[in-house]
Amino acid sequence: MFDRRILLTTVAGLFGLAAFRWLRATPAEAGDKAAGKFEIEKTDAEWRAQLTPQQYEILRKEGTERPGSSPLLKEHRKGVFACAGCDLPLFASDTKFESGTGWPSFYAPIEGNVGKTEDRTFGMLRTEVHCRRCGGHLGHVFDDGPKPTGLRYCIDGFALVFHPAAASAT
């Protein structure tokens, strides 16, 4: 006959193993974040020297800025939003929309420049997005965005730099 303590210990162990496997991040696509292989690779000291403390925390440590704190939230000019780590163009201004979340939001990235990884932190399944070239953490993508894609790329503004479009000659 089973002792109740053995049964409970066994069940707890199985749940612990399942939770450990579930919480591990697994690759979803582009720019092999799981393997840490990117075109631009720098030491931690080089990243710290190049980035502001807030950019470093977001891009390299997968942090998040306080909602409403990024000046890019109110950026409405024509241009391109690029990675603050390597300047790779990530989002065109015409894909930006007001989501009301407190972070710059876009309905589509520039083709091939944003990678995705499963993120199981905080006990939920989300899709993390990162720069394809340097691996910098950008934010997350959700399926509650506007047409035409239905996606909302919720991006930390401090992970981006904005390059205004050149004034057209008249």
Image (spheres, helix red, strand yellow):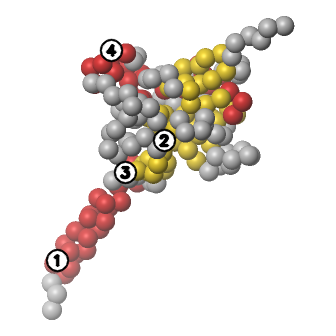
Amino acid type for the residue under numbered disc 3 = Ala
Residues at discs 1 and 2 in contact (Cβ within 8 Å): no
Task: Please determine whether, in this image, residue 10 is positioned above or below residue 32.
Answer: below
Which tag, 2 or 4, sits closer to the chain's start? 4
Cα gap from disc 1 to disc 4, whole angstroms? 54 Å
Quadrant including the N terminus = bottom left
Percent position of residue 98, x then y: 69, 33
Task: Please determine whether, in this image, residue 41 is positioned above or below residue 25.
Answer: above
Name the one closer to the observer, 128 or 135.
135
- The residue sitting at the top extreme is 170
Cα gap from disc 1 to disc 2, whole angstroms? 46 Å
Instruction: Tell me the residue at 77%/12% (across/down).
Output: 168
Residue on which disc 3 sits: 25
Residue on which disc 2 sits: 115
Percent position of residue 141, x then y: 55, 44
Residue on which disc 1 sits: 5
Cα gap from disc 2 to disc 3, whole angstroms? 14 Å
Which tag, 1 or 4, sits closer to the chain's start? 1
Residue on which disc 4 sits: 49
Horizontal arrangement in the rendering, residue 58 relative to residue 69 (left or right): left
Amino acid type for the residue under numbered disc 1 = Arg
Label 2: how many Cα within 10 Å (few below 14, some 14–19, many 20+): many
Which tag, 1 or 2, sits closer to the chain's start? 1
Q: What is the quadrant of residue 40 in the picture? A: top left
Amino acid type for the residue under numbered disc 4 = Ala
Which tag, 2 or 3, sits closer to the chain's start? 3
